[in-house]
Image (cartoon, grey):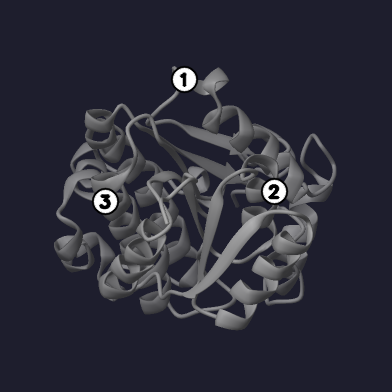
């Protein structure tokens, strides 16, 4: 039987990925990869019950072999036309080592491998975080190393050694900074397929992952953040999907290698408003 549909790869069976896939995944085969196969099956069932065509695959973002297996499964249904990477772990959920392996290395590998097979004119988006914008500027050399170091050498960079990482939040921040830099590099490579790739850096979005953060050791910090940001509230997954829809449609045809901060103004408040850290 001939393949008749373009394929969307969705990694991370969570609320943001689901919102984006529902917004733009109609008339596509949606292959959902998640480390927790039950979560992937649950999202696939929700989508199939809503008239979409989705299938679940177990996938570990920290493992290149697992990523390649996901891509191979996706290619069985047709050409890969879209990538939505919403997989990752948060500072309250994982160790420094796991955050770097999943959020930093895994995202870099996924963008690299999908970029090799993306359909001509295809498009992708990866979910980064406001955290990458809040970290102090890195040097030009450090930024370039994060952007261009071969993926299998990334975790050997001096900047990523545990002695240079203060805590899990710092690991998360640098992983998300790396995501944005890798998107810039991959945008050049994807362009050989006339394909585009961008990142979105959400602020506090109400999801199960965010609720873990609200109830974690930094819960008061996050609640204070959205209380003192210009929007005065957390965001919703559908508001992230609004931007993803623009980036992944023809209306975003001139946008590639870019990052979009969607945080209700929290980063602005952090630098120039009431969220600014008090210096003693």
Viewed as shown, does residue 58 lie left or right of 234?
left
Whether residue 240 is situated above or below residue 15 in the rendered picture: above
Q: Quadrant of residue 153?
A: bottom left
- Which numbered disc covers residue 22? 2
Looking at the picture, tell me which residue is in the foreground, 241 or 118. 118
Camera-nearest label, 2 or 1 = 2
Residue under the image location 35 percent in, 41 percent down: 183
- The 10 Å Cα crowd at callout 2, few under 14, some 14 to 19, many 20 or more, is some
Residue under the image location 56 percent in, 27 percent down: 249
Q: Report how far apart the C-alphas of labels 1 and 3 lie in the structure.
A: 21 Å
Q: Report how far apart the C-alphas of labels 3 and 2 lie in the structure.
A: 25 Å
Residue under the image location 31 percent in, 26 percent down: 194
The image position of residue 47, as x and y in percent, is 71, 60
Q: Report how far apart the C-alphas of labels 2 and 1 lie in the structure.
A: 21 Å
Badge 3 vs badge 2, beta-carbon distance below 8 Å = no
- Which numbered disc covers residue 84? none
Residue under the image location 55 percent in, 71 percent down: 56
Q: Of marks 1 and 3, which one's residue comes earlier in the chain?
A: 3
Label 3: which residue?
112
Q: Of marks 2 and 1, which one's residue comes earlier in the chain?
A: 2
The image position of residue 142, as x and y in percent, is 23, 47
Label 1: which residue?
253
Secondary structure at numbered mark 3: helix
């Amino acid at each position: 039987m001939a393949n008749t549909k373009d394929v969307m790869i969705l990694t991370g069976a969570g609320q943001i990925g689901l919102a984006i896939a529902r917004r733009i995944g109609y008339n596509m085969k949606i292959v959902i990869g998640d480390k927790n196969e039950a979560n992937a099956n649950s999202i696939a069932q929700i989508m199939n019950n809503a008239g979409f065509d989705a299938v679940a695959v177990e996938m570990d973002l920290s493992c290149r072999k697992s990523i390649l297996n996901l891509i191979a499964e996706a290619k069985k249904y047709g050409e890969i036309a879209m990538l939505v990477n919403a997989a990752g772990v948060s500072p309250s959920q994982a160790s420094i080592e796991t955050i770097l392996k999943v959020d930093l290395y895994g995202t870099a590998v996924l963008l690299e491998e999908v970029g090799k097979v993306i359909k001509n004119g295809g498009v992708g988006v990866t979910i980064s975080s406001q955290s990458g914008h809040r970290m102090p500027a890195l040097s030009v050399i450090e930024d370039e190393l994060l952007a261009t170091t071969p993926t299998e050498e990334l975790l050997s960079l001096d900047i990523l050694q545990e002695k240079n990482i203060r805590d899990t939040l710092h690991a998360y921040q640098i992983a998300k900074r790396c995501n944005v830099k890798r998107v810039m590099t991959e945008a050049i490579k994807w362009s050989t397929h006339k394909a585009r790739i961008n990142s979105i850096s959400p602020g506090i979005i109400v999801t199960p992952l965010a609720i873990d953060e609200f109830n974690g050791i930094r819960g008061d910090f996050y609640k204070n953040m959205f209380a003192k940001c210009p929007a005065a509230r957390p965001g919703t997954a559908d508001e992230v999907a609004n931007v993803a829809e623009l980036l992944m449609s023809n209306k975003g045809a001139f946008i590639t290698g870019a990052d979009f901060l969607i945080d209700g103004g929290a980063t602005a408040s952090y630098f120039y408003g009431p969220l600014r850290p008090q210096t003693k």
